[in-house]
Image (cartoon, rainbow, N blue to C red):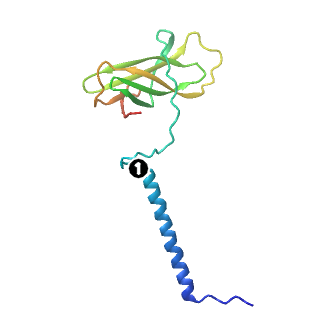
């Protein structure tokens, strides 16, 4: 026996039901996502925009054992406490360029950090130039408070950089 055709009114009810069911499902998903971003005390927790990266180990400067040191811009600063910052920078994985020192210039209105890198003595034989993210801990003589942190490795004038908190 052939199937009976569904009347037009029945098709409209089916389409309306599907639209209503879809909107309800979307609402449930959005409410679930909102609940997942709430802490137990009811406040919203931040949702990361990018996955957290592993923290690179601290590097040690080689003062006096580096030749041809030049200022290098750093990528970000993270506040460890009010008198300590961690600077992140692009380092050379092959060892052909190493951290010489970090110059700290503090004033009541700003903190300027200049990172210097150069060639170690003796220079390794083969330089591949592969980059890695490195980190160096920088002590301050006075609390950072609300002073901006400037990158002294940028020219012609130091760039202000935001300071993150872990």
Total labels: the figure holds 1
Q: Report the side of 66 relative to 142 (left or right).
A: right
Q: Residues within 10 Å of mark 1 (few under 14, many from 20)?
A: some
Work out whether 159 lies above or below 42: above
The quarter in which the N terminus is drawn is bottom right
| Residue 68 visible from this viewpoint | yes
Residue 111 in the image, given as x and y percentages of width and height: 32, 25
| Residue 157 shows in the view | no
Q: Badge 1 is on which residue?
A: 38
- Tell me: 94 left or right of 163: right
The residue under the point 61% across, 87% down is 6
Closer to the camera in the image, 119 or 157: 119
Quadrant assignment, res 146:
top left
In the rendered view, would you say 33 is above or below 22?
above
Q: Quadrant of residue 113?
A: top left
Q: In the structure shown, which secondary structural element does the residue marked by tag 1 occupy?
A: loop
User: Where is residue 66 shown, x and y percent of the image?
Assistant: 51, 12
Tell me the residue at 47%/57% (across/down).
32
Where does residue 92 sit, x and y in percent of width and height? Answer: 56, 24
State the image coordinates of residue 128 (x, y, percent, origin top left): 63, 24
């Amino acid at each position: 026996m052939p199937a009976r055709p569904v009347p037009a009114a029945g098709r409209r009810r089916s389409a309306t039901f599907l639209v209503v069911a879809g909107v309800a499902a979307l609402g449930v998903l959005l409410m679930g996502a909102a609940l997942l971003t709430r802490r137990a005390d009811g406040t919203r927790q931040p949702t990361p925009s990018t996955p957290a990266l592993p923290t690179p180990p601290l590097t040690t400067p080689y003062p006096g054992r580096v030749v041809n040191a030049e200022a290098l811009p750093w990528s970000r600063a993270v506040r460890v406490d009010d008198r300590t910052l961690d600077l992140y920078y692009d380092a050379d994985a092959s060892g052909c360029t190493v951290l010489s020192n970090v110059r700290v210039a503090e004033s009541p209105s700003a903190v300027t950090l200049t990172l210097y890198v150069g060639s170690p003595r003796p220079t390794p034989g083969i330089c591949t130039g592969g980059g890695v993210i490195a980190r160096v801990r920088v002590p301050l003589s006075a609390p950072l408070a609300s002073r901006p942190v400037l990158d002294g490795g940028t020219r012609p004038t130091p760039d202000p950089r935001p300071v993150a908190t872990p």
